[in-house]
Structures are given as C-alpha cells and as structure tokens.
Amino acid sequence: MSWIVVLTLGTKVGATTALLVAGKDIRDQPGWGSGLWWLTKLTPYLAIACAIALAMMREHDAILPLSAMAVFVAIAVPLKIRQRRVRIRRRRPT
C-alpha cells in the first residue's frame, strides 16, 4: 500500500510540473491539459486514504496528522474545482 502513496503523489508531481510548463490556458481546455488538471486534484484523495490505512496498521502516531491532512484535502480540492468552473464560465461568451 505504501507504493500506492508514492505512485499517486509522484503522479501528482509529474502532472503539476507538466501543467506549469504548459501554461494556464492549457489546463482549462478540453484534452490532455484538462485530464492532467483533474489528475492533480484526485490523486491526493487516494494517497491520503492509503496513508491513513498504513498508519492504522503500523504507526498509530501518524493517524492524527494524516487525518488533519485528509480534512485539508477534503476542503481544498472542492474549492479549487469550484474556482476552475467559475474561471471557465467567465471565459465563455454568452
């Protein structure tokens, strides 16, 4: 399970790097940029869930900080998704 955490967070870093290199306009367009943007938002959910499961099995001291990170992810990701939808809506001509 720890390899899942490493793989998902590595994927997030790679997708974020690709989006930063490509520019802001690419991530809101349909295609690979949009897919990478969604990847950067969904991978933390899987990574934090696996990290908490690992902490429950091995390191009980890590459960509280990881739970706090889970709360942060549960609040921050939907806010970023909402911001993206508003940004895309503003760009569309009416």
Image: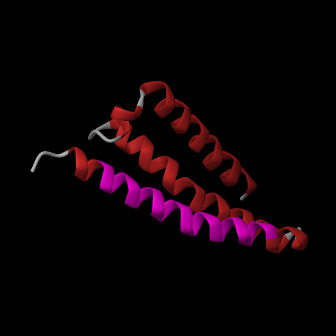
Give the answer, above or below, for where 52 lies relative to 94: below
The image quadrant that residue 28 belongs to is top left
Residue drawn where x is 50% and y is 31% of the image: 20
Q: Magenta segment: does it hold 18?
A: no
Image position of 71 (left or right of 83): right
Instruction: Locate residue 78, reporting x and y percent.
Output: 46, 64
Query: In this orientation, which residue lies closer to the viewer: 14 or 76?
Result: 76
- Farthest top residue? 21
Image position of 72 (left or right of 36): right
Give the answer, above or below, for where 67 lies relative to 80: below
Residue drawn where x is 37% and y is 52% of the image: 84
Quadrant location of the N terminus in the rendered image:
bottom right
Q: How many marks?
A: 0
Residue drawn where x is 9% and y is 51% of the image: 94
Instruction: Locate residue 53, reporting x and y percent.
Output: 73, 70
Magenta stretch, residue numbers = 65-87
Query: In this orientation, which residue lies closer to the viewer: 62 or 78?
Result: 78
Predominant secondary structure, magenta span: helix
